[in-house]
Image: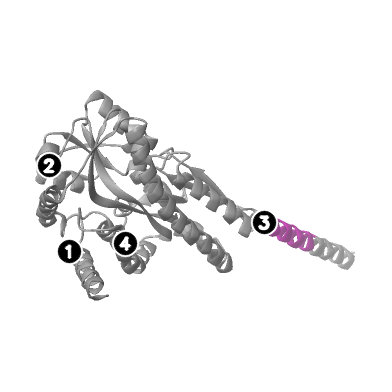
């Protein structure tokens, strides 16, 4: 009786093992087929070229991945300010963001060298050159912190919009100037430069202008138009203060879940999106400026050579505050040296 019982028991064990293996295989296959869902945030308002380009990239990612990648884009700061986006990416409640260099600098301070040295760049071609030169180094630094760069881009020039007409740095110093909340270095440097910084979240700018809590703000024209800043700040100084540089990043935790061959395809699509955003974003700022002038009565204060020189001298006076504090000294010096070499080469090229 004992042997048949054991034989029957062993057979049962084998059947259970086989069933378990089949179930495990089925569940493993089912898990492998589950799409990777990516929540991507941006401060860019809904309907702008930035938002539309990200939506297009999301569709392309789903297509080239055969449905294995699903991206949901949240525009207009729905997921909070840039500091909040970064924190959410760190805990993986948000997986990706289109974010400015100021936001990225909260992860890697060196990124500030791409946009936070006022009036250092004389043209957008110079901005492109510095981005190309520094991108590999910035990519590596961010990767070490757990963030993968999908593409770099920019929105053209930042200008000053104000409730009262301004021409000189002294005029601006009399107004309460918006600065991003949660960035004490920026606030300190702006104050040391003789200005009146008022820290706020970007989503509060229009309300701040309406109430008089702030009286001036620096931003590219496309944002001023999309957020109707011209209604409360009807004056703009036509001065190329600094570029607004940014990048689309994804947390490494999510990126590492994607097979290498698929990563290559997604990266290729992302690079195309970066080029589109740069091209359309710059054009959108130009068109927005024209719209605000012709349709909404924005008054644009021209800047002649003498006035530009005055502002450049003021900006250069802030470099002692920026170098080594806001922008690491090594990167600050490297950007200036690269630009000097670039300008020398251009002059010597027939």
Along the line of sight, which residue is nearer the eye, 213 or 29? 213
- The quadrant the N terminus occupies is bottom right
SS of the residue under disc 2: loop
Residue under label 3, please give it.
Answer: 33
Judged left or right of residue 151, residue 327 is left
The magenta stretch is 16-31
Spatial distance from mark 3 to mark 4, Cα to Cα?
A: 45 Å
Spatial distance from mark 4 to mark 2, Cα to Cα?
A: 26 Å
Q: Residue at x 22, y 49 (%)?
A: 241
Residue 251 rendering spot, x and y as whole percentages: 44, 56
Spatial distance from mark 3 to mark 1, Cα to Cα?
A: 48 Å
Residue under label 2, please give it.
Answer: 168
- The reply to whether dot 4 and dot 1 touch (C-beta < 8 Å) is no
Spatial distance from mark 4 to mark 1, Cα to Cα?
A: 24 Å
Crowdedness near tag 2: few (<14), some (14–19) or many (≥20) residues, C-alpha within 10 Å: some
- The reply to whether dot 4 and dot 2 touch (C-beta < 8 Å) is no
Residue under label 4, please give it.
Answer: 125
Upstream in the sequence, badge 3 or badge 1? 3
For the stretch drawn in magenta, the main secondary structure is: helix
Crowdedness near tag 1: few (<14), some (14–19) or many (≥20) residues, C-alpha within 10 Å: some
Spatial distance from mark 3 to mark 2, Cα to Cα?
A: 61 Å
């Amino acid at each position: 009786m004992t042997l048949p019982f054991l034989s029957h028991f062993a057979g049962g064990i084998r059947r259970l093992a086989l069933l378990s293996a089949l179930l495990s295989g089925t569940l493993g296959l089912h898990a492998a087929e589950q799409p990777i869902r990516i929540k991507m945030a941006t401060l860019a308002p809904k309907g702008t070229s930035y938002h539309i380009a990200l939506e297009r990239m999301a569709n392309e990612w789903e297509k080239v991945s055969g449905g294995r990648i699903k991206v949901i884009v949240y525009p207009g700061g729905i997921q909070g300010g840039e500091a909040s986006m970064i924190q959410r990416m760190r805990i993986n409640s948000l997986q990706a963001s289109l974010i400015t260099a100021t936001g990225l600098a909260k992860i890697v301070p060196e990124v500030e060298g791409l946009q936070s040295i006022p009036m250092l760049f004389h043209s957008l071609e110079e901005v492109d050159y510095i981005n190309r030169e520094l991108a590999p180094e910035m990519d590596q630094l961010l990767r070490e912190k757990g963030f993968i760069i999908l593409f770099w881009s920019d929105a053209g020039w930042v200008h000053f919009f104000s409730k009262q007409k301004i021409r000189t740095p002294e005029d601006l110093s009399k107004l309460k100037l918006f600065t991003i909340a949660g960035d004490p270095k920026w606030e300190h440097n702006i104050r040391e430069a003789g200005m009146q910084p008022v820290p706020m979240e970007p989503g509060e700018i229009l309300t701040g202008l309406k109430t008089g809590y702030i009286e001036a703000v620096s931003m590219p024209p496309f944002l001023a138009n999309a957020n109707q800043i011209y209604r409360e700040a009807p004056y703009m100084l036509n001065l190329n203060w600094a570029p607004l540089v940014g990048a689309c990043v994804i947390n490494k935790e999510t990126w590492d879940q994607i097979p290498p061959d698929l990563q290559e395809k997604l990266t290729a699509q992302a690079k195309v999106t970066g080029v589109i955003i740069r091209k359309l974003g710059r054009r959108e700022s130009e068109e927005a400026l024209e719209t605000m002038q012709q349709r909404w009565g924005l008054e644009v204060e021209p800047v002649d050579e003498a006035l530009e020189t005055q502002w450049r001298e003021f900006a250069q006076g802030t470099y002692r505050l920026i170098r080594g504090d806001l922008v690491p000294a090594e990167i600050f010096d490297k950007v200036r040296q690269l630009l000097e070499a670039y300008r020398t080469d251009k002059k010597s090229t027939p």
